[in-house]
Image (spheres, grey):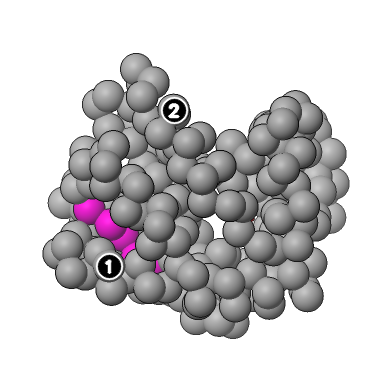
Amino acid sequence: MNFIFLGPPGAGKGTHAKLLSQKHGIPQISTGDMLRENIKRATDLGKQAQVYIDQGELVPDDLVIQMVEERLAQPDCQKGYILDGFPRTVTQAEALSKFARIDKVIDLVADTSVILGNLSGRRVCGNCGATYHTRRLNGATTCAACGGKLIHRVDDQPETILHRLEVYHKKTEPLIEYYKKADLIMDVVVESTIDHDFMLIEKALGL
Ligand code: AMP
């Protein structure tokens, strides 16, 4: 099964896509993680992407589309995948429809207060990319999984968060209508514990 997780930054796409990936053994394809990995390795793509990411802008469609098309052609994607953070524009969705068949789209619906709380307290491991929240870290500054240093992403700073939300409303929200027309979308309101919200997602996906 091929799924898309849609929703504003900070709604929990990455958290839930990861849980689903671990539980059902299908890869989580996070374009944000892939781009950050390219930045870390200082590839041409990473160098081009960094300036957009740091400013809370979207990376140009052609760069991201090519990256995803290549990734989905890998053997581990043949039995299914979860797209986390892609598509983010109608142009990306149209391109995707030419090289992928999507079975269901989950739209994570979250209150702005939840989103702002999730993003401003988010810390990520600079080494392995694991995600944490200050409300559960008890002051820890290193990753429980690998010992790497926890960082506050440049694009999780307050001014950039607000800009990312504007970009989401303008460029990504139209995808809700796009996938509604294709009769693929299911709304899931995320407002409870991770376990409870995850149960709702699995139910929406018929898993
Ligand atoms: P994320 O980790 O999904 O929040 O993505 C972090 C940043 O990576 C976004 O704010 C964008 O700058 C960039 N990015 C991730 N996915 C895409 C995409 N599908 N299209 C364009 N830019 C993207």
Q: In which quarter of the image is the N terminus?
A: top left
Image height check: is 182 above or below 153? below
Which picture quadrant has residue 100? top left
Residue type for callout 2: Glu
Q: In this view, does 69 lie to the left or right of 100?
A: right
Pointer 2 residue:
70
In the visual, does 74 lie left or right of 10? Answer: left
Left or right of 88 on screen, residue 133: right
For the residue carrying disc 2, how many other residues have a C-alpha within 10 Å: few (<14), some (14-19), or many (20+)?
few
Q: Earlier in the sequence, mark 1 or mark 2?
A: 2
> Is 17 colored magenta in this rendering?
no
Disc 1, SS: helix
Q: Dot 2 lies on which element? A: helix
Residue shown at the point (46%, 42%) measured from the top left: 65
Mark 1 crowdedness (10 Å alpha carbons): few <14, some 14-19, many ≥20: some
Residue 84 coordinates in the image, percent (x, y): 45, 49
Disc 2 CB within 8 Å of nearest ligand 1 atom: no
Residue at 25% over, 64% down:
179
Along the viewing direction, whichever of 55 and 120 lies nearer the viewer: 55
* Residue 2 visible to an observer of this rendering: no
What residue range appears in magenta?
104-108
Q: Which of 192/117 is in front?
A: 117
Q: In the image, is residue 15 above or below residue 111?
A: above
Q: How many marks?
A: 2
Q: Which of 122 and 104 is in front in this view?
A: 104
- The x, y position of residue 204, in whole percent, is 22, 59
- How far across and down, in percent of the image, does residue 192 sit? 44, 70
Q: Indicate whether 29 appears above or below 17.
A: above
Q: Name the residue under label 1.
A: 178
